[in-house]
Image: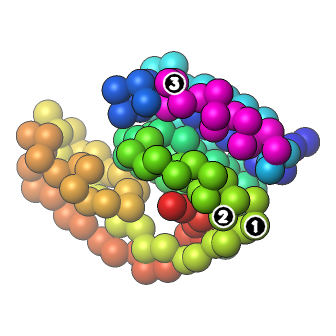
Amino acid sequence: MKDWFVIVNPKANSGKIEKDWIDIKSLLDINLNYELNFTNRRYHAVELVVSALKKGYKKILAIGGDGTINDVLHGVFLQKDIPLSEITLGYINAKMDNYIECVLNIALDKAVMKDVFEVKYYESKVLQQRYVFDVETVTGRGIEDITVSLLPNSIRTIHC
């Protein structure tokens, strides 16, 4: 088994990850021992991370936009196989330009504890629950009756 389970959304940020993929992959190949997975539909990242954790992976790297990163985070919190304290979540946001620094931070395990928000809301009269780093990624989508709970220092992250 590889050290890192990598989840990539090539369509993130209007296809920026797909355009930059050769450079990103070169950096990953040099610095990380990883299994590569691409998302191909909405919420696919949630499924991939739950499956990875069931297989025993404890280091997950998300490469994509805010939605991809929040889907991976959500999958980490949904699963019950591995305690959160044993999981490291790395992420490279499609909005950034300095992939070298980010991959090196991940390779050097420059992790910090990060707050997570548990968000409960109604969308189309159905109760939804999400785990996110940024509440703004959930609000403003025609949702109602939103409840936000802070889960301080709840996950070990490496991010740029």
What amino acid type should be assigned to the residue bearing mark 3?
A: Glu
Looking at the picture, how far across and down is residue 23, in whole percent? 64, 34
When the figure is inspected, residue 83 is found, relative to residue 31, above or below; the finding is below
Looking at the picture, how far across and down is residue 96, in whole percent? 43, 49
What amino acid type should be assigned to the residue bearing mark 1?
A: Leu
Tag 3 residue: 18
Region of the chain picked out in magenta, as a range: 17-30
When the figure is inspected, residue 151 is found, relative to residue 33, above or below; the finding is below
Q: Which mark is residue 29?
A: none
Question: Within 10 Å of the Cα at label 2, are there few (<14), some (14-19), or many (20+) other Cα atoms?
Answer: some
Tell me whether circle 3 and circle 2 mark residues in contact (CB < 8 Å). Answer: no
Looking at the picture, how far across and down is residue 50, in whole percent? 63, 42
Q: Which mark sits nearer the N-terminus, 3 or 1?
A: 3
Q: Residue furthest bottom?
A: 152
What amino acid type should be assigned to the residue bearing mark 2?
A: Asn
Tell me whether circle 1 and circle 2 mark residues in contact (CB < 8 Å). Answer: yes
- Residue at point 39% right, 45% down? 95
- In the image, taking residue 84 as reference, residue 150 lies left or right, namely left
When the figure is inspected, residue 134 is found, relative to residue 7, above or below; the finding is below
Numbered disc 2: secondary structure: helix
Task: State the CA–CA distance, disc 3 to disc 1.
Answer: 25 Å
Q: Residue furthest right?
A: 1
- In the image, taking residue 70 as reference, residue 138 lies left or right, namely left
Is 58 or 36 nearer to us in this picture?
36
Tag 2 residue: 105
Look at the image and say whether residue 29 sits in the magenta stretch. Answer: yes
Numbered disc 1: secondary structure: loop
- In the image, taking residue 145 as reference, residue 155 lies left or right, namely right
Task: State the CA–CA distance, disc 3 to disc 2.
Answer: 22 Å
Tag 1 residue: 108
Q: Which mark sits nearer the N-terminus, 3 or 2?
A: 3
Numbered disc 3: secondary structure: helix
